[in-house]
Image (spheres, rainbow, N blue to C red):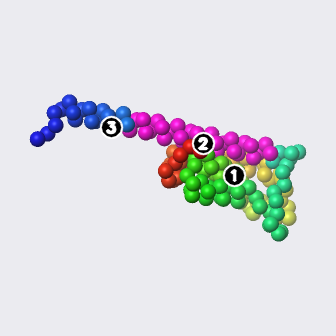
Amino acid sequence: MNPPPQVIYNRRAMHTIQSIYLYIHNLQDANYFFAVFLLTIIIIRLSLLPKKRIVSPKLGDMHVHHYIYGILIIIIAFLFPSITLYAAGLGFFVDELPLFGIEQWLFSHEDWHWGVYHSPKSMMILLFSIFLVYLFRYNLLMLLPHTVLL
């Protein structure tokens, strides 16, 4: 025996309301994710202005660049699910992402200088990367298991 039409309608309406709520909630989380990501990049860029530059620490002869911190923070965010850590780690990583291609593409290692970091080509690649993260912010957030705001 089928349930009365009123019950079917109420279940569908309830399911639709729950779906809309989850979509809005996840979209809010995705917007929060993008805001933290963008704020991380802004803070990094301001701290690395030519006159206020912070030099990266060294391990032996190797500089520990901030993309390495980003990778470590992303790993921690996956181990202890946190939207904030994930977004900040991705911000650290994406901020230095343009230099992977530009440094080898335009300059030999000896010719590299801080102008490359602030060059128009580097900024264009960074802005394009930020745009891609904005477009796929919801999908990037769904990669994190059992996401929570922390």
Q: Amino acid at mark 1?
A: Phe
Q: Residues within 10 Å of mark 1 (few under 14, many from 20)?
A: many
Where the C terminus falls, by quadrant? Answer: top right
**What range is drawn magenta here?**
19-47
Residue at x-position 52% and y-position 48%: 147
Q: Are marks 2 and 1 in contact (CB under 8 Å)?
A: no
* Real-space CA distance between mark 2 and mark 1, rounded to the nearest whole angstrom: 13 Å
Q: Amino acid at mark 3?
A: His
On residue 15, which mark appears?
3
- Asked which quadrant contains residue 110, the reply is bottom right
On residue 92, which mark appears?
1
Q: Secondary structure at mark 2?
A: helix
Label 1 or label 3, whichever comes before in sequence order: 3
- Asked which quadrant contains residue 109, the reply is bottom right
* Real-space CA distance between mark 1 and mark 3, rounded to the nearest whole angstrom: 39 Å
- Asked which quadrant contains residue 78, the reply is bottom right
Residue 24: x, y in percent? 46, 36
